[in-house]
Image (tube, coloured by chain):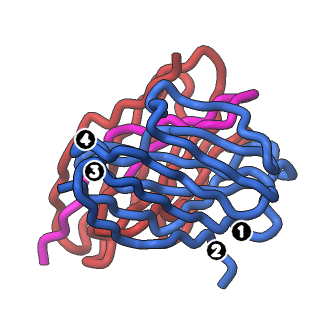
Chain colours: A blue, B red
Amino acid sequence: DTGVSQDPRHKITKRGQNVTFRCDPISEHNRLYWYRQTLGQGPEFLTYFQNEAQLEKSRLLSDRFSAERPKGSFSTLEIQRTEQGDSAMYLCASSSTRSPYNEQFFGPGTRLTVL
Amino acid sequence: AQSVTQPDIHITVSEGASLELRCNYSYGATPYLFWYVQSPGQGLQLLLKYFSGDTLVQGIKGFEAEFKRSQSSFNLRKPSVHWSDAAEYFCAVGVRGAQKLVFGQGTRLTINP
């Protein structure tokens, strides 16, 4: 199966630590998205890449958050100086510019718990 | 800005009963519409999508949804639910020319045996 994969699936960290998550999109997809989902809510858009270019960032993406997609394939999302409010599920999705309707396919997510 | 409302936070139905989950959107033009399902601790799986054309769309797992422009709605239906349908269901809107999806807050479906 060549779906979207994310690593790790779960991360527990202490407040103030830095964490990094990885996302591998579907291989032929050139668009990659990051969303955040808190308990009882729907996913909220954070940022997206087309190839290696980061083309849009949400206001939710504070300066403690940084995302990269250096070679236009996998992406990393880093959170510096984590806070308890960063506890959430971080979802990655991918899509292809060949789809004019932006059909996005999601990975299993990384559950972050900040103690 | 576009928004999505799922009025029902939690619905309980009996196994074998019919199901309808409501979704209303706010957007000035015809959006792209999606329904996703999320099992506990998992990512989102695409159930079905509407872009244009026939307003009744079929999806996986026996689900269907109907786009009603006059009501700005895209309700999800299933004629007979199975215990395995218990999950969280999210309606989402995609905007032409933009890349992000805007999600509703979700409806949690519980199935009684």
Q: Earlier in the sequence, mark 2 or mark 4?
A: 2
Q: Secondary structure at mark 1?
A: loop
Q: Secondary structure at mark 2?
A: loop
Percent of width and height locating residue A59? 48, 24
In percent of the image, x 68 and y 65: which residue is there?
Answer: A25
Q: Which mark is residue A26?
A: 1
Q: Secondary structure at mark 3?
A: loop
Say whether marks 1 and 2 touch (CB < 8 Å): yes
Q: Nearer the viewer, residue B72 or B34?
A: B34
Q: Which mark is residue A3?
A: 2
In percent of the image, x 29 and y 68: which residue is there?
Answer: B40
Tell me where the magenta segment starts and ends, as one range.
Answer: B89-113
Q: Which mark is residue A85?
A: 4
Same chain for labels 1 and 2? Say yes or no.
yes
Say whether marks 4 and 3 touch (CB < 8 Å): yes
Residue type at mark 3 is Ser
Residue type at mark 2 is Gly
How crowded is the residue under tag 4: few (<14 C-alpha within 10 Å), some, or many (20+)?
A: few
In percent of the image, x 32 and y 59: which residue is there?
Answer: A112
Same chain for labels 2 and 4? Say yes or no.
yes
- Farthest residue, direction bottom: A1
Q: CA distance from mark 1 to mark 2?
A: 5 Å
Q: Earlier in the sequence, mark 4 or mark 1?
A: 1
Q: Earlier in the sequence, mark 1 or mark 3?
A: 1
